Image (tube, rainbow, N blue to C red):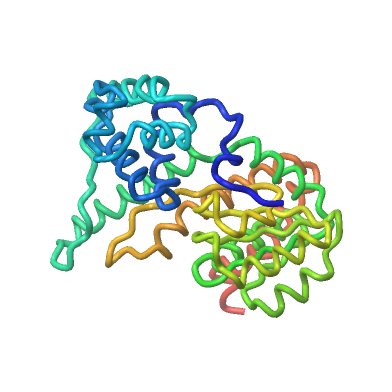
Amino acid sequence: MTHNVKEIFAGEAPPAPAALAAKVRTLAPSMTRSMQRVAEAVAGDPAGCAALTVTGLAELTGTSEATVVRTARLLGYPGYRDLRLALAGLAAQQQSGRAPAVTADIAVDDPIADVVAKLAYDEQQTLADTAAGLDTVQLGAAVTALAAARRIDIYGVGASGLVAQDLAQKLLRIGLIAHPHSDPHLAVTNAVQLKAKDVAIAITHSGSTGDVIEPLRVAFERGATTVAVTGRPDGPVTQYADHILTTSTARESELRPAAMSSRTSQLLVVDCLFVGVAQRTYETAAPALSASYEALAHRHSPRGRMR
């Protein structure tokens, strides 16, 4: 089963104005350079672009009318007219008194207070973008599969491996059998054992991490339900994913690499999955969670630590 960007967003309603900027940030890395210029223009100056005809926007960005129309469709709009309406809505929202965004990169000589402010803004924007772009239908389907799973394998390396561990730990505390795998050899040998009632989750910001794709492919071929949590909805990992959960592709800088920005959006998706599963399995999840708290309670008390 293969996926491309056009297939992923086919049939969806056009994104709301608030989600437009998030979709631009998510899809821009997979666009051609000319389409990126159009996408960056509409996200950077929605009011100005909303006033332009398709010819005017093509001239502004040094592209063609066909490129403008293709970009509009890739972003989820039937045509350029629909994109202009969304741009007008976005411009109106931006002019409603909202405080200006902190967008500057962190500099080596920034005071620590500025570093805190810039990181806080970037984290907030990443979370907002991920929430705006997350397909709740796909999320619901993944939750349904997890809630009924016999066993859950989660693949991730590097920073994504930490997120995989976080999800596994959460699921274990509500009584599900979940295993995180960061070793590619162990991941594949475990994936071979998966069956139709099992679930495999691959977490990869780039969507092209071979050590994560390989076990997901094996799980897919064994009949397990597969889920990809990725910042690239057209990445190779989605070829083997029954359900795709897209995370925000946050802006990187020299002092804020992808490993930091991607982890923020991945953890939001992980929390959404966990809460969704806990809701579906509440009758068993609530007692299991309570039992885990009680089992660890003595470790958090002064008396317990002195034993």
Residue 301 locus on image (x, y percent)? 56, 66
Q: Residue at x 25, y 52 (%)?
A: 118
The answer to which quarter of the image holds residue 109 is: bottom left
Judge from the rendering whether residue 230 lies leftward or rightward of residue 195; answer left or right. left
Judge from the rendering whether residue 264 lies leftward or rightward of residue 207; answer left or right. left
Residue 44 locus on image (x, y percent)? 26, 38
Q: Residue at x 61, y 29 (%)?
A: 11
The answer to which quarter of the image holds residue 181 is: bottom right
The answer to which quarter of the image holds residue 97 is: top left
* 16 and 79: which is toward the camera: 79
* 107 and 23: which is toward the camera: 23
Q: In the rendered image of this protein, does residue 239 appear above or below residue 25? A: below
Q: Residue at x 28, y 26 (%)?
A: 55
Q: In the rendered image of this protein, does residue 177 appear above or below residue 7? A: below
Give the total of numbered labels: 0
Judge from the rendering whether residue 36 lies leftward or rightward of residue 290; answer left or right. left
Q: Residue at x 56, y 40 (%)?
A: 6
Residue 130 locus on image (x, y percent)? 47, 44
Judge from the rendering whether residue 245 lies leftward or rightward of residue 93; answer left or right. right
